[in-house]
Image (cartoon, coloured by chain):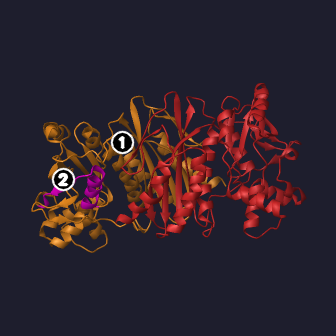
Chain colours: A orange, B red
Amino acid sequence: MANEFSLINKYFKPLGEAIASPNVVMGIGDDCALLANKPGYQLAVSTDTMVAGVHFFADAHPIDVGYKALAVNLSDLAAMGAEPAWFTLCLTLPGRDENWIKGFVQGIEILAQQFAIPLVGGDTTKGPLSLSIQVAGWVPEDKGLTRSGAKVGDHLYVSGEIGWPYLGYQVSTSSLQLNDADQREGLERFLRPLPKLALGANLIDVASAALDISDGLTADLNHMLTASGIGAELDINALPLAAPLGAMSDDIQRQAINFGDEYQLLFAVPSDKQTQLTALQEQLSIKLYPIGTLVDGPGIVDSQGNPIAPSGYEHF
Amino acid sequence: MANEFSLINKYFKPLGEAIASPNVVMGIGDDCALLANKPGYQLAVSTDTMVAGVHFFADAHPIDVGYKALAVNLSDLAAMGAEPAWFTLCLTLPGRDENWIKGFVQGIEILAQQFAIPLVGGDTTKGPLSLSIQVAGWVPEDKGLTRSGAKVGDHLYVSGEIGWPYLGYQVSTSSLQLNDADQREGLERFLRPLPKLALGANLIDVASAALDISDGLTADLNHMLTASGIGAELDINALPLAAPLGAMSDDIQRQAINFGDEYQLLFAVPSDKQTQLTALQEQLSIKLYPIGTLVDGPGIVDSQGNPIAPSGYEHF
């Protein structure tokens, strides 16, 4: 009986205690965690499940699994412009494999430390390998960056190159060979995406709408368009494709664009905020890529006005 | 691609929208939900996973699965003295079985409506059947009912009869036959436990410590004792056993007591709060059962001072 509790005390409690937080009144170990309010802010919460054999290979390195499980959740906070506050973890394991758990916790800890987000609770159960993380973060009252605020005339941006996770996935399944540097880059972007939290928090006063690219560029753009009730003219030639894709076929490029798993932000910026956006790029030392304009909808068209059907990850 | 989203729109979004809540600024459909603070309160959060074949039979009725998944989580809020605020749901399904989902949502809705707690977000993924629910609730600042506040001399109480879920489980696996009324009672208590939210909220100013009985009476009592750094003298003869157990062997009685899955509250009350506790019983029209006293520790002893080893559900 003491086994679940000894696992929690050995691996998960330290992951909470390692990160001092003004939010945490009481962390792991009681029926509930207790968290303090932050006056003037609202709480943003998001949760994502990852299943072995579906979202990651069953034999994936546990450090990579832990890292990415927290990364994809933090990316949702970034897309809302929220500052990380705490997270919980539900972990289902076939058995008590302490080496796996140790690696998994190490992977989580990389991002938990980097973004000062403590683990405050969870559940450890027996069953087929899977996990759900829930993150909570703070956004200034009524400033949350939703998907629904984009307006006709706004400019569409993406926060980085698109297609590296597709290349990394192909490399990891030995379906593709690239030069060493590109292989490393692809694998890194596929296995260790960095959530764009600083950008998201700074977009609160600049962007009219935002989301993170998880299902695929056109699928996620379509979510924004549907929520905002407008359309988009996408400048295909302006898409910042990962360099190795330049030499590949149109078909492969399309697959890469719609592969998803990018965790770049896709966001809309009104014309009168372009100066602020330029300043923000300098302040954060990042490059942002204009990829189109929001127009009367519905749907996505290219620069010649030809419709582009959204396509992306199929959940069922 | 639209499949996950159509499931969400058809079954899960209505479950959020059906319940008006001052807490919900923005519910299902964006990267995060946005929730309002409640000044003067702290947030209590808890999460529990249920896996098919481990926590419920793979062929269990989906209404029962949905009901119990929310019930066990609400029970954690009750044990903390918290008032329900919102919940999220991570659901992993082998395929798109709409009948199952429909029943499952109906089961959740029974308690969501009864306790006015809206669904605000989640994730639906493909994989072996399992689910994690996370609940959030409000407790008045620094009044949360923890496990660690029990003191020597406090009296130990349980909120209802113990052993019915064990009997219900045995009946449901055809390992036991009882008369019709007892079978119904056992199954009802096993499949449809009612979280003790009114009691929990009212115990905030009365109890020194509380938890809900999920692992088994002695195992959970031991959690309270460890957290509080004391011991307990348990009056075995005073335990309010489910009536059918009276005719069964000591061994079966012990198994029933330590079966867990009860979702009754176990709590400690100082001597000077006994009058308030009596008043509370009348106010809520409930019967509470004194089952022992807190003493110098460690561990549990019976009325003759013989040690009782804690025993309960083995997670691994």
A172 on left or right of A252 = right
Amino acid type of the residue that numbered disc 1 sits on in the rendered structure? Phe
Reading the image, the residue beneath label 2 is A296
* Mark 1, other Cα within 10 Å: few <14 / some 14–19 / many ≥20: some
Depth check: A207 or B214 in front?
A: A207
The N terminus of chain A, quarter of image: bottom right
Chain name for mark 2: A
Q: Residue furthest top?
A: B272
Could you say which disc has been placed on residue A115 in the image?
Answer: 1
Measured as percent of width and height from the top left, residue B116 is found at: 56, 44
Amino acid type of the residue that numbered disc 2 sits on in the rendered structure? Asp
Measured as percent of width and height from the top left, residue B125 is found at: 44, 63
Specify the segment rendered in magenta.
A216-236
Measured as percent of width and height from the top left, residue A232 is found at: 19, 55
Secondary element at tag 2: loop
Majority secondary structure of magenta residues: helix
Depth check: B17 or B28 in front?
A: B17
Magenta stretch containing residue A217, yes or no?
yes
